[in-house]
Amino acid sequence: MTATVHGFQTQVTKLLDLLANSLYSNKEVFLRELISNASDAIDKLHFMSLTNQDLIKDDPNFKIQIRPDKDAKTLTITDNGIGMTLDEANSHLGTIAESGTEAFMKNLTGDAKRDSQLIGQFGVGFYSSFIVAKKVTVITRSVNASEDEGVKWESEGNGTFTSENIKVPFRGTQIILSLKDDETEFTDTWKLRECITKYSDHISTPVELYEEKYEQPKEGEEKKEPEKKFEYTQINNAQALWTRTPKDVKDEEYIEFYKHLSHDYQDPLTWAHNKVEGDLEYTSLLYVPKMAPWDLYNRQNEHGLKLYVQRVFIMDKAEAFLPNYLRFVKGLVDTNALPLNVSRELLQETAVTRKLKKALTKRVLGMLEKLSKDASKYTEFYKQFGNVLKEGPVEDYDNRDAILKLLRFASTNNDSAECSVSFEDYISRMKEGQDKIYYITAESYEAAKNSPYLEQLKTKGIEVLLMWERVDEWLMGNISEFSGKEFVSANSQDLKLGNLADEEEKKKQETAATENKDLIERFKKALGDKVKDVVVSTRLIDSPSCVISDTNRMMTMQMRRLLEASGQ
Ligand code: ADP
Ligand code: MG
């Protein structure tokens, strides 16, 4: 059979140009991507072999091998994982998911280091081979295919690739990189050792490097030129990181593992590693990233933890273990309490999942509580994820108080748009006789801060929380109190000042109403159906008038605008 020439999907070609040209300064990431693909392929086969041992009986020891060849200027990465059929190779190594590429392109910053780290995040990892290779050859055989159904795929990264069926005597995938003339440092075992250690130390599959061994002359033997001998040596310790005792794991190891797990280029903001024994045995390793992913608010956002059962990888992005409002958390859970053949559907239904979800949610909330003690880190966290967290009190009734404690807002107490005031801070500063938490929602910080609705509260020296995020209005409409203190919107007709209202003012208001009866009538006539009522109020100090919403109708102005904007 002769090889068929295929054109890459247009986006792939664009991407390849980009990779080759702009992501030059951090080129070793290609190795991380290829090791990570090899490890994924092994995880997949390992999982299948649980129910069908025969699949791997010819070659039962999973491993990843890396072999440089200085003379040929090639670097070969081999795994004995699941492999690919011809169709699979054509589609997996010829296209990229539309949304992924688009997002990748949009997210490019021009900063080569940052951009190169985005590669993995957008699932375009394999193509990073072309950063260092002028030609990539893939020899692969699917676990389900016979020797004759092996595949050779090849490309020089310039718009086309070729592929054909060939005889392949082994299972798995071999990626042969023909290195560009100036990238031959990647045949240097010292350089490779350094990269492999960095990217694979926590991987549970052995990663071996083909390197030169010098035989020490035996005692008594005549000294002669040591013979050059090559063999594979294992580089990583191949013990899954989360199975180790937390106190023995170094911070750098947690950080590198996070990068492997999340494809993030930045360090995580914080993490929590717990091994729990007893009724429900599980290990969890949970991370909070520094930056929100591009699709945090996208309905199609895929998130969730990696699930392992007895250290065997079962699935990625298992959503069932954390509530939606914690969808920014990355990490894994490993448990003995679920069957190895658990499916996504089954996960949704089992009591074990529910118990784990409850426990893991508490872990995350605890981790955030701890993080909140570090003001600068927490500010950083809150800027990225605060608005997602605000979905929590409504979504997760059981943890409502714990989540409310984690929320922060700007306030009239300090002159800054920084959201740093918690409900607890607010309560600790409440005026004598005050038993309500006052807040205002507006379209922006400036609008909230300068709102005429605040005038009366300001003169009384009452602090008001300032809110302007879309989600705030919705959140406040759905919660009524914190720690026994009722929330009152400054936009509403009745400020419920209670003890804080003074009698004199009330009288003033009544007198003003009688005195200005005629004027009010004229206003009402002029405004007609546009308003429900016109009343005299003492709440304004500097402004002549303001529009307020009817407290009974539970809809404040901001909410109205939102609904109008969405066409309702
Ligand atoms: P991602 O790993 O995010 O899916 P990649 O570009 O790294 O994206 O890989 C694309 C796809 O190619 C993988 O999803 C997988 O199906 C296939 N693939 C890549 N490398 C291997 C491999 N070593 N063994 C089997 N399949 C592979
Ligand atoms: Mg990959």
Image: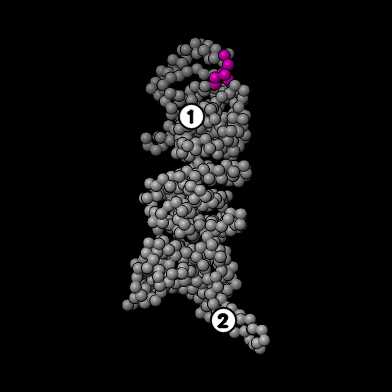
Q: Position of residue 529 (x, y in %)?
A: 38, 22
User: Given this view, does label 1 or label 2 mark the residue nearer the observer?
Assistant: 2
Q: Which residue is mark 2?
A: 229
Height in image: 468 above or below 22? above
- Identify which residue is drawn at 58% across, 33% down: 424
Q: Are marks 1 and 2 in contact (CB under 8 Å)?
A: no
Q: In this orientation, does residue 303 appear?
A: no
- Which is nearer the eye, 102 or 327? 327
The Cα–Cα distance between marks 1 and 2, rounded to whole angstroms, is 75 Å
Highlighted range, magenta: 497-503
- Magenta stretch holds residue 81: no
Regarding mark 1 in the picture, which secondary structure is present there? loop
- Identify which residue is drawn at 57% across, 74% down: 188
Amino acid type assigned to the residue bearing label 1 in the image: Ser
Total labels: the figure holds 2
Q: Position of residue 199 (x, y in %)?
A: 54, 63
Q: Quadrant of the C terminus?
A: top left
The numbered dot on residue 480 is: 1
- Magenta stretch holds residue 501: yes
Q: Position of residue 109 (x, y in %)?
A: 53, 56
